[in-house]
Amino acid sequence: MRKMKKMLLMIVGLFIVSLFSFVQAQDFPTKDLSGIIMWGAGGATDNVVRALTPMVEPHLGKQIVLQNKPGATGAVSTQWVVNQPSDGYTLLYGAENPQLYRVLDISPLDYKDFYPVNITARGVGLIACNVNAPWKTLKDLFDDAKKNPGNIKMGSTGPGGLPYVVGAMMKATHGLTFNAIPFPGEGPGMTAMLGGHVQWMTVGLTAGREHVRAGRIRPLALVADEPVPGLEDIPLIISAYPEYKKYLPWGPFYGVWVKRDTPEPAKKKLVDAFQKGVKDPKFQAFIKDFGAVPMNLYGDGADKFLKHWQSVSCWLLEDAGATKVSPDKFGIPKP
């Protein structure tokens, strides 16, 4: 009898806690939110986040307090958000990197553990070098790399980052290897390239475009199969090497997530607010000016996009011999 009463009290207690959480979610948000950015200041993800957030806050009626928390190719911030309550008050502002964590043995997490509030845009990779580097074209860089395997200093953001994946494409296609110097984000990496501490780097066009316009870095190629409006003078990688066509279109993407088990009312309010923020003409102008492709995906549509991107990228790395664990182990299908 005592056991039955104890069990009944536990069930009632759980029901009350669930009901309280549901009621709280209905009133969401009642306080300011925390926005955790997985990359350092000045990079593409950081730029997109700081352009978008002011457009979203009026629709939530609260402030989103932003904090850069880089490290381990974004795994530091990803794990940190997972450790927070599933109440919708902690947002993960991220890029594509978690979709590669498992095959690179960085973390057991990926975006399967998060709900996609909004995938805002897809970027284009820009291969660029220091203005004092000896290369005028991508072919110049490749020819030099063939003569000096593993010696040319390449800026990187760690395993799974944009420079790493493009480097894997180069290794798989041409057998090229470089001396990868890791940085906690594109911003610090570009700063190092500007100072001559690394010689070249692949960055998101959203992070590198203004440096190109100002003549601070030399563009060698876009990792794209179509010209970017306003930057038609930058060659496409397929112009010099058509064999890269099989990987394209491909590129980084930017978005915001909450934990997958966040209450539905909180998810809905976040989705609505971010949808409106992304559609804001000021943000659309920003995305266009940065050379990114608008997306504005959420929920099931975003999950479908994420799975496809993961499939293409993980098997690219597997074919290049860059994975530590086969995508097969995690049931990631071949594209």
Image (tube, rainbow, N blue to C red):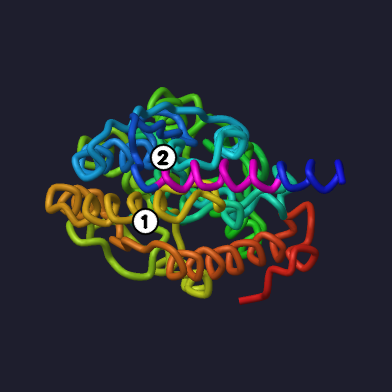
Q: Residues within 10 Å of mark 2 (few under 14, many from 20)?
A: many
Q: Say whether residue 14 is left or right of residue 37.
A: right
Determine the secondary structure under disc 2.
Answer: strand
The answer to which image quadrant residue 43 occupies is top left
Along the viewing direction, whichever of 104 and 134 lies nearer the viewer = 104
Q: Tell me the tag on residue 183.
A: none
Q: So how many labels did they put on this image?
A: 2
Whether residue 167 is visible: no
The answer to which image quadrant residue 329 occupies is bottom right
Q: Residue at x 42, y 45 (%)?
A: 23
The mark nearer the N terminus, 1 or 2, is: 2
Q: Residue at x 73, y 47 (%)?
A: 8
Q: Residue at x 21, y 35 (%)?
A: 214
Along the viewing direction, whichever of 19 and 116 lies nearer the viewer = 19
x and y percent of residue 211 in the render? Answer: 28, 36
Q: Say whether residue 184 is left or right of residue 61.
A: right
Q: Amino acid at mark 1?
A: Lys
Is most of the magenta stretch helix, strand or loop?
Answer: helix
x and y percent of residue 161 in the render? Answer: 55, 46
Determine the secondary structure under disc 1.
Answer: helix
The residue at which mark 1 appears reads as 268
Q: Tell me the tag on residue 129.
A: 2
Q: Is residue 22 highlighted in magenta?
A: yes
x and y percent of residue 308 in the render? Answer: 54, 70
Give the residues drawn in magenta, as a range. 11-25
Q: Residue at x 55, y 36 (%)?
A: 85
Q: Is residue 35 highlighted in magenta?
A: no
x and y percent of residue 31 in the render? Answer: 34, 30
The span from disc 1 to disc 2 (Cα, nearest Å) is: 43 Å
Q: Say whether residue 32 is left or right of residue 149.
A: left
